[in-house]
Amino acid sequence: MVCCAALLIAVPRAQERAQPRGGQTTDMNGIAERYVKLVLALGQHDADYVDAYYGPPEWKKEAESGKVPLDDIAARAKTLLDDVAKTPGSKVENEQLRHTYLERQLSALAARVRMLKGERLSFDEESRALYDAVAPTLPESQFQKILDELDKEFPGPGPLISRWEAFRRGFVIPREKLDAVFKAAIQGCRERTVAHIPLPDTERFTVEYVTGKSWSGYNWYQGGFRSLIQVNTDLPIYIDRAVDLACHEGYPGHHVYNALLEKYLVRDRGWVEFSVYALFSPQSLIAEGTANYGIDVAFPGAERVAFEKANLFPLAGLDGSKADEFYRVQALVERLSYAGNEAARRYLNGQIDRNAAIEWLERYALMPKERAAQRVRFFDQYRSYVINYNLGKDLVARYVESRAGARGNSAGHWQEFEKLLSSPRLPSTLK
């Protein structure tokens, strides 16, 4: 692991957990505590399952003291689901959403237990069970139309992917300049976020550069409004990834999402279920969808290219005169994102093998071989989780824009976006 110089980090003052407000407290709070302990228990069987936890430390110690058998976890999950169903409803929207949240999260936990016990689900069955959503199935012809458009952008001999990669090589951030570029991107993303969303005074995060991962970036939320953000440097990092990662992992993405949940739901309301983040759950579609859509909220329209030409291209030593062309073509390439879902669906359903999945990604997603191989390793580790990035973004965009109007109404988009970040809303409630 290679670490960069850390951003300033501030440890918040100790605070007592706030008392819950409003109705639906005793029963739901008891269920919430049992839910958290169940998530921690399952985490002893599945190293990736507990993505973040900052609740009572004694609950974590209890979970670590010995593995609860999967059959017992399954039985407890069923009992908890029955208890949620028996709990009286509420006319208060957030409490209705809390009820739905716990029901969906527990259903996903039960599905994950079945998977760990050996049950095989199809790609779509798995995504519905874990993430409360199913991505559309798209034919090769849809991606081929986009590839035909791209082919016209790069005329000449050789495969399209080779011509595309030759063009992209001029936009790689030199390794020695990566830290400066990334910090400038973080600063730009944060300035835009705090202008619209009030954040806790003590929020901070640390950045590390790492290798040997199946992902390009990761936010590890620590609690106390702090995050550890890791950036994988195994493969070349292009200039567009600086803002993508700074927004997605930091502002207004995962870091802000988790900080707002901690502030408004855990501390202000005492809803302890939000002190744990079960990765393979519906919450992840909201987390990844808002993190990806947050890029467009922070940099609407032409603002992103203008910001990068003025700030990031010079720091990276790249030619800013080609920025407009790069992003015009990049917008076409992004329309291929669902090709990754198709590769994962076919691979995980056993229709194609690893080499065929890599070839599919090379052909239809325009990923070079090394990046395609890394993506298949991601499929192995996280499986149908891939839908949370593109389908999640599309669902979040539709939800926010149905309330704030078409993109361009900056204040309205920020307002609706913040509401979503700080609420218990889940995929099936994005209506």
Image (cartoon, helix red, strand yellow):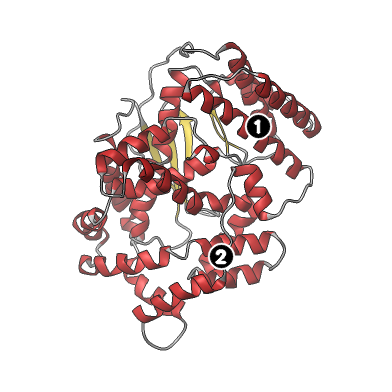
Residue wearing tag 2 = 138
Tell me the CA gap for discs 1 and 2.
30 Å
At a point 65% along the width and 53% down the height, the residue shown is 124
At a point 29% along the width and 51% down the height, the residue shown is 180
Could you say where residue 57 lies in the image, as x and y percent from the top left? 58, 20
Say whether residue 49 is left or right of residue 171. right
| Residue 409 can be seen, yes or no | yes
Q: Is residue 350 above or below residue 127?
A: below
| Residue 275 can be seen, yes or no | no
Could you say where residue 188 lies in the image, as x and y percent from the top left? 26, 45
Could you say where residue 132 lies in the image, as x and y percent from the top left? 59, 43
At a point 24% along the width and 69% down the height, the residue shown is 322
Pick the residue in front: 396 or 382: 396
**Mark 1 surroundings: few (<14), some (14-19) or many (≥20) residues within 10 A:** many
Q: Is residue 217 above or below residue 367?
A: above
Q: Amino acid at mark 2?
A: Leu
Could you say where residue 29 lies in the image, as x and y percent from the top left? 58, 16
Number of numbered tags placed on the structure image: 2
Which residue in the rendered view is the most extreme toward the front? 91
Q: Amino acid at mark 1?
A: Leu
Q: Is residue 411 above or below residue 232?
A: above
Q: CB atoms at circles 1 and 2 under 8 Å apart? A: no
The disc at residue 173 is none
The disc at residue 106 is 1
Pick the residue in front: 17 or 409: 409
Secondary structure beneath disc 2? loop
**Mark 2 surroundings: few (<14), some (14-19) or many (≥20) residues within 10 A:** few
Say whether residue 298 is left or right of residue 349. left
Secondary structure beneath disc 1? helix
Say whether residue 125 is left or right of residue 191. right
* Quarter where residue 419 is shown: top left
